[in-house]
Image (cartoon, rainbow, N blue to C red):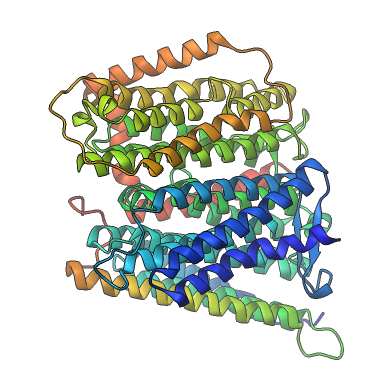
């Protein structure tokens, strides 16, 4: 069928564009990137139309060879939603980066613009490959391509500090991916295929399946930076230029997260257990609390936004236990998974907008110290509104993508009787509100002698557009928005305000807050972080074995 | 299926273990990178053994893992090249290649 041929195209177009953009160089780089982004977005829209509107699952067999020998590319509704969402964010980033990454007139070819556009396209192509691939080894290649695109984005400006962040990221991500690959090898040895559909039918619980799931999951969590494996993320995401931070925080981490979803829901569905999913979600809940409190203690806005990403990664893992049925015996596609994907898209749009707003503030003031943000709201109303809107979108208290996602997950929590995750889902909004209010309170303070450099209007509007897109996702939900929960909103905002005031005024004297700071310093050192990686793998192994 | 001696599994396991140990304990990034390659060698060796074990009658080995193995080696090679480049650049600009964040080392 014609629509199936779109699957290789959605991967090949960004990669082809990246190569051509790099080969042409000079002023042609950005032009080629724009042409590629326009084409790729059109393809993504066609896939979304075929898959979401007409409800078909697209399947393409490369070269006409069928698995187990050949490779299958597939896109169901969830993959199509991810492809479409990523295309929207890439368009937003391209508009935002237009001015920052154009070739300056004085020189023939500056380095940063030459490499930024091909890298952005490469990240996009690698993500699309991760969304459509139905083969665990192809997913490994996609994740490595994603790392190869993401690492240089971290150190675009070439300062020693960002090079160090990039190196930490590269080495930790490589450790994660080699663990994933070792898991794949074991699966091939036991079942003779790496095709996800075939594996889903062949895998039986046992030592090989448990060990492979354990190694693959631990490796992928290291690449996704789920607490406590986040040592590389804050310096890498906070040090990169704003457009690159937006791509890294909004998009790159979703690749390895999506592979965790494919492994748990499809390939190893018969091997994963209720207990192991509880471990995964417990890490997510710990990430929300730990990273939100640590965010409040950050002196710089971009670091705060990076810690906010860590907290939001936690949300993405809450859906795993909720996908089990009421007896806790089987993991199933359903409301929880839909909620998780919607949460990922909602975070992608909102976080890209938030990083762009932080970058614009930095460009205008020449610094991003949160304590000195007074007067920003008056000088840069659009950017402040963008930050506020993206913060509200992340909280999920007003009808938005995250709001519907939370509704879906809360329904799943009720249906499977796991009230404790319902508490985390509802309470998490207060933690998010905490750091958003913390920033807005300082930005809204009057300060008449603040001097701001002009920032490109198009960049401001691109960021605002993405923040609004996060709200529009509410209409993409499959269920009606339902009744508006005013009480929950008030509790979240009130709780967040109290948290912000409390931590800001006497944070270092409160044992819990001080503990988060110490824990963060310890976990951002290499040895504890890598030991945690091995420890987590052991924990998953125990939880998988115990469940059977 | 061709039966293989047990040490075809034990040697890769030992390599993966030694490599992971190196990644955890060595402070220098270059040594971490070499350790990463040791883990990689363990995984690739295991893949080779899997290919031999899964051999069907006319062939000496299952060709699919061999094809994947070559791809994996190329990917690991690219990753190593990227990391070495970062280490060199970092050394050029700051004089040291410590991985710990500035001021906390």
Residue A253 placement, left or right of A5: left
In the image, what residue occupies the spot 78% across and 59% down? A199
Q: Please report the residue visible at 58 percent of the width from the left and 49 percent of the height from the top.
A: A86
Q: Quadrant of the N terminus of chain A?
A: bottom right
Depth check: give the residue in front, A4 or A434: A4
- Residue A185's place in the image compared with A52, above or below, is below
Q: Quadrant of residue A27?
A: bottom left
Picture mark count: 0
Looking at the image, residue A301 lies above or below residue A195: above
Specify whether A12 is left or right of A437.
right
Q: Residue furthest top?
A: A487
**Residue appearing at x 47%, y 59% in the figure:** A120
Decide if residue A4 is in sight here. yes
Give the image quarter of residue B26.
bottom left
Quarter placement of the C terminus of chain A: top right
Query: Which quadrant of the structure image shows residue A192?
Result: bottom right
Horizontal side of A359 relative to A492 (left or right) equals left
Give percent across and percent down for residue A405.
Answer: 63, 30
Residue A502: where, in percent of width, then height?
29, 17
Residue located farthest toward the left when viewing the structure as drawn: A449
* Residue at the front extreme, as displayed: A105
Residue A15 spot, x, y in % from top left: 57, 68
Front-lying residue, A271 or A21: A21
Asked if residue A373 is positioned above or below residue A58 in the image, the reply reads above
Where does residue A100 sit, x and y in percent of width and height? Answer: 33, 54
Q: Nearer the viewer, residue A360 or A411?
A: A360
């Amino acid at each position: 069928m014609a629509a199936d041929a779109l699957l290789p195209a959605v991967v090949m177009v960004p990669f082809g564009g990246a190569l051509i953009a790099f080969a042409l160089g000079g002023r042609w780089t950005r032009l080629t990137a724009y042409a590629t982004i326009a084409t790729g977005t059109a393809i993504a829209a066609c896939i979304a139309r075929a898959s979401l509107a007409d409800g078909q699952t697209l399947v393409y067999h490369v070269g006409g060879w069928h698995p187990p020998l050949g490779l299958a590319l597939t896109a169901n509704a969830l993959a199509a939603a991810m492809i479409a969402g990523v295309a929207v964010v890439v368009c937003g980033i391209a508009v935002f980066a237009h001015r920052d990454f154009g070739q300056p007139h004085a020189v023939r070819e500056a380095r940063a613009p030459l490499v930024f556009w091909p890298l952005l396209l490469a990240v996009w192509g690698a993500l699309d490959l991760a969304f459509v691939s139905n083969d665990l080894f192809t997913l490994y290649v996609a994740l490595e391509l994603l790392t190869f695109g993401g690492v240089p984005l971290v150190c675009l400006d070439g300062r020693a500090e960002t090079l160090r962040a990039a190196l930490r990221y590269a080495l930790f991500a490589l450790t994660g991916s080699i663990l994933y690959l070792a898991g794949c090898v074991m699966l091939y040895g036991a079942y003779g295929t790496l095709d996800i559909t075939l594996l889903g039918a062949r895998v039986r619980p046992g030592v090989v399946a448990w060990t492979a799931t354990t190694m693959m999951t631990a490796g992928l969590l290291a690449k996704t930076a789920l607490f406590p494996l986040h040592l590389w993320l804050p310096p890498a995401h906070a040090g990169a230029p704003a457009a690159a931070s937006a791509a890294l925080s909004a998009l790159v981490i979703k690749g390895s997260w999506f592979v965790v979803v494919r492994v748990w829901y499809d390939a190893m569905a018969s091997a994963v257990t209720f207990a192991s999913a509880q471990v995964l979600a417990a890490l997510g809940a710990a990430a929300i609390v730990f990273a939100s409190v640590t965010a409040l203690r950050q002196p710089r806005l971009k670091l705060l936004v990076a810690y906010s990403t860590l907290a939001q990664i936690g949300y993405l893992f809450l859906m795993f236990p909720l996908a089990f049925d009421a007896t806790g015996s089987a993991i199933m596609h359903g409301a929880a998974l839909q909620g998780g994907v919607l949460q990922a898209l909602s975070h992608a749009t909102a976080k890209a907008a938030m990083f762009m707003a932080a970058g614009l503030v930095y460009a205008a003031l020449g610094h991003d110290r949160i304590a000195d943000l007074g007067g920003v709201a008056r000088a840069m109303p659009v950017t402040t509104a963008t930050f506020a809107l993206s913060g509200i979108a992340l909280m999920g208290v007003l009808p938005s993508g995250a709001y519907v996602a939370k509704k879906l997950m809360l329904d799943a929590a009720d249906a499977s009787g796991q009230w404790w995750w319902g508490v985390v889902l509802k309470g998490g909004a207060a933690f998010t509100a905490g750091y958003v209010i913390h920033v807005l309170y300082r930005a809204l303070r009057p300060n008449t002698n603040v001097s701001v450099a002009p920032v490109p209007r198009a960049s401001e509007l691109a960021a605002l557009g993405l923040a609004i897109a996060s709200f529009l996702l509410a209409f993409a939900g499959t269920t009606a928005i339902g009744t508006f929960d005013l009480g929950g909103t008030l509790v979240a905002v009130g709780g967040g305000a109290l948290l912000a005031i409390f931590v800001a005024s006497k944070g270092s004297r409160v044992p819990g807050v001080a503990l988060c700071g110490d824990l963060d310093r310890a976990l951002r050192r290499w040895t504890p972080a890598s030991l945690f990686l091995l420890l987590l793998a052991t924990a998953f192994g125990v939880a998988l074995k115990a469940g059977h | 299926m061709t039966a293989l001696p047990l040490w075809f599994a034990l040697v890769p396991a030992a390599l993966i273990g030694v490599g992971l140990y190196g990644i955890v304990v060595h402070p220098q990034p270059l040594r971490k990178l070499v350790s990463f390659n040791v883990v990689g060698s363990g995984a690739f060796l295991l893949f080779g053994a899997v290919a031999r074990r899964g051999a069907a009658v006319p062939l000496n080995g299952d060709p699919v893992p061999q094809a994947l193995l070559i791809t994996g080696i190329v990917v690991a090679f690219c990753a190593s090249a990227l990391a070495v480049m970062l280490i060199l650049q970092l050394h050029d600009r700051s004089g040291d290649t410590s991985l710990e964040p500035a001021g906390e080392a």
